[in-house]
Image (cartoon, grey):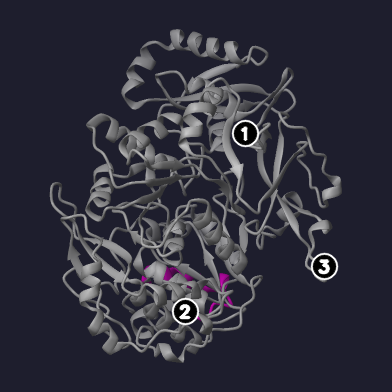
Amino acid sequence: MALRSRSSCGKLASVLCFLGCEKSRTLDSPPASQNFFCQKNLSPVMTISIGDGSHGSNDSHRNESHRNERFSPIPKRSDTNPCNVGLRLTEQAFQRPDQLAIATPTGSHRRGTSRRYHTISMEDLDHRSTSLAAGFQAMGMGPGKKIALLVRFGEDFITLVFALLKCGVTLILIDPGMGRKNILNCLQATSPDGFVAIPIAQAIVKAYGSRFPHAKLNVTVGRRFGLLPHPTLAQLENSNRESFVPPPTSMMDPAAIIFTTGSTGPPKGVLYTHQTFNSQIDMIASHYAIEPGGLDLSGFPLFGLFNAVMGTGTILPDMDPTRPADVDPVRLLNAIDQWGVNQSFGSPALWTKVGLYCKKTGRRANSLRRVLSAGAPVPPRVLEQIRAAMHPEGMMFTPYGATEALPIASIESRMVLEETAPLTRIGKGTCVGNRFAGIRWRVIEITDGPLTHIDQTREVPPGTIGELMVQGPVVTQSYVTRTDQNAMHKVRDDSLTPPGSDTPVYWHRMGDVGYLDSHDRFWFCGRKGHRVITPSGTLFTEQVEAIINTHPWVYRSALVPRGTAPDQKPVVIVEPWRDRRRLVADNGLTLQTEWERLIQTHMPDHPIDAFVVHPGKLPTDIRHNSKIFREQLTQWLDKR
């Protein structure tokens, strides 16, 4: 059904964006003073205040006898399905039942005081998710059903993801900030069989029910009112978890549909199988030597899900996960100190904010030994600032990948700062490191059209810029929405098909351009769709922008084209540091000369047609607040 009016569409967008920006817990969640899991088959969640940097494990241990009275033993490893990624939580709960799984901040933040938290153990998280899985099964959810999850990231979200995975449905996960048109189109394109959603989202879904004709399996996560669907989450939590029967699951069974951010076009629905998730978990844990028992401050929702199945506790940060660039560094650093957090994942925008604060104030995070940052290239200055603030022996990694293929490669900050960063500053691209074990990659001639079979590709020699293609167990095999894009991104390779299998194997064209060096490291030079083709040659965004970004008054920049290929004119749009804007405005002609000189020094054959100072912040992606939306800047430039 077409939208009836622009105003009704705007209301829907406001409601759905509420999923990512509303500050309170769902209506099922009581005030901080209550223990709200005192229901059948569930143990109470502890409300604790930490002032000594402890992990809260003693508090969990004190509830051990109480929990044993309520729960029968969880299944042993041999009783679980080794393929279903949701049941990996059951394995962790069996091995370390009392370990902290999730800590959620409660109340308001007050500087100089210890924060209060709701906590839940691995065993309690597993039991709660299994009870919900039993309830979902009783409703008719199971393999073959697609269920959209519209719940703000937090403890409920993590629990529901595991519950739905356990019962074998295909999860539909959408970024709440992708915009009204994209949200509606993405949900409709997946044809969900139901929605597990907060009340306000359920109300809107019901109002536009004709767009979702198959959505019969619906759960309201919160207090039900009016004509909202039932049951509620609270009702399902009373389900007998012993009635849950894990469905038969193979590695290639669908597990989730996750959408790209849409930074280079409309979002695409990527099909994740149980193999995809299992391989991601195994590769990340192995590559970064993540051992059970650690604590992660999770600035990115997906990593919060990985933590539980790696035996790592998740400390939920006091931040809006859809706006990492607006994080309050004090709140994050206080949480790290309170809990003795040893690792954290966040976007470059998040660590930029934290790094600047630490440099200015001298604040440290001494317990922090492992930091990961992804979503866009991480500026060397950010690596320097975070390295200076964390444990002296700590390491900061920048994994490389995409929604369709993650992780692909990784590099540690020491290699960047000591070897590759100087080359990045003079326009050689950004080195993303070596590939993960199990990943194949090759750089081929840049082609804008489809490549359906590996025989159609032509590999280029090391040092030559081309487009990157990858293959491995974490590389997804297809889009399930906008399926026309499969021909543009998926390349069949029959030589990789296992003997006796009739399932084809595909490489994925990343859409990134760059080159391999003599150490088999990939140097990222930009997105294929963002290259600027001029009469004097082709310019790549990452190479040009890195040169301009060395200027002390420039925070970041964006290379965009004016006109059409092959006669485009390159324009660099500059975002100054906030405290330098007045200086930039007063010294425009001088700065133009300085920026031109930088380009002339390092790229003498590729002059820039114009430099333009942006009046505000450059538009960035909704997921990491780090990828620059160059298409929007091109439109803005054309309107000037």
Disc 3 residue type (three-letter): Pro
User: Residue 201 is drawn in which quadrant?
Assistant: bottom left
Query: Residue most toward the front?
Result: 393
Tag 2 secondary structure: loop
The earlier-in-sequence mark between 2 and 3 is 2
Cα distance in 3D space between marks 3 and 1: 35 Å
Q: Are marks 3 and 1 in contact (CB under 8 Å)?
A: no
Disc 2 residue type (three-letter): Asn
Cα distance in 3D space between marks 2 and 3: 42 Å
Which residue is identified by label 1?
A: 523
The earlier-in-sequence mark between 2 and 1 is 2
| Disc marking residue 218 | 2
Disc 1 residue type (three-letter): Trp
Q: Please state the horizontal and vertical placement of residue 111, each as a whole percent of the image.
A: 15, 47
Which residue is identified by label 3?
A: 499
Q: Nearer the viewer, residue 138 or 94?
A: 94
Q: Please state the horizontal and vertical placement of residue 610, each as a whole percent of the image.
A: 56, 17
